[in-house]
Image (cartoon, rainbow, N blue to C red):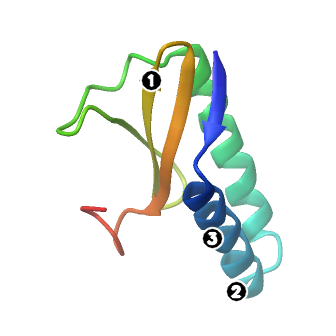
Amino acid sequence: MKVLLLPEAAQEFEDAVVYLEEEEPGLGTRLRAEIEAHIGWIIENPTIPRLREGAYRQVNLQVFSYYIAYLIKNETIWILAIAHGHRRPDY
C-alpha cells in the first residue's frame, strides 16, 4: 500500500518533533522513530483498528500521547492527522 500524509498532518508531525526536541534534546528524534514505526505497522495491518465515526481509523502511540488518524481509499493510506491525544482529543 502507498502512504500519503496530508500537508496538515506532515506539518503537525514536524511541529511536534521540533517542539519536543527543544524541550529535551533527543526527544523529538524518539517521537519521529515511534511515529515511523507505527506507520510501518499501519501499512502491514491497515484494517485492524476499528472504523470510527467519519470512516477513519486511529492508532495511538505507545510512548508519546499522540495518535495517527488515517483512512484507506483504494490502495492508499491517507494520514489525516498526527495529533496530541490530550491537547486535541476530539480533533
- Residue at the location (64% across, 47% down)? 35
The residue under label 1 is which amino acid type? Answer: Ile
- Mark on residue 72? 1
Q: Secondary structure at mark 1?
A: strand
Mark 1 to mark 2 CA distance (whole Å): 34 Å
Mark 3 against mark 1, which lies toward the viewer? 1
Q: Position of residue 6 (x, y in %)?
A: 58, 49
Q: Position of residue 48 (x, y in %)?
A: 38, 18
- Mark on residue 16? 3
Q: Position of residue 22 (x, y in %)?
A: 75, 86
Are circles 3 and 1 on residues that touch, CB within 8 Å?
Answer: no
- Residue labelled with disc 2: 23
The residue under label 3 is which amino acid type? Answer: Ala
Mark 1 against mark 2, which lies toward the viewer? 1
Q: Secondary structure at mark 2?
A: helix
Q: Quadrant of residue 18?
A: bottom right
- Residue at the location (17% across, 38% down)? 53
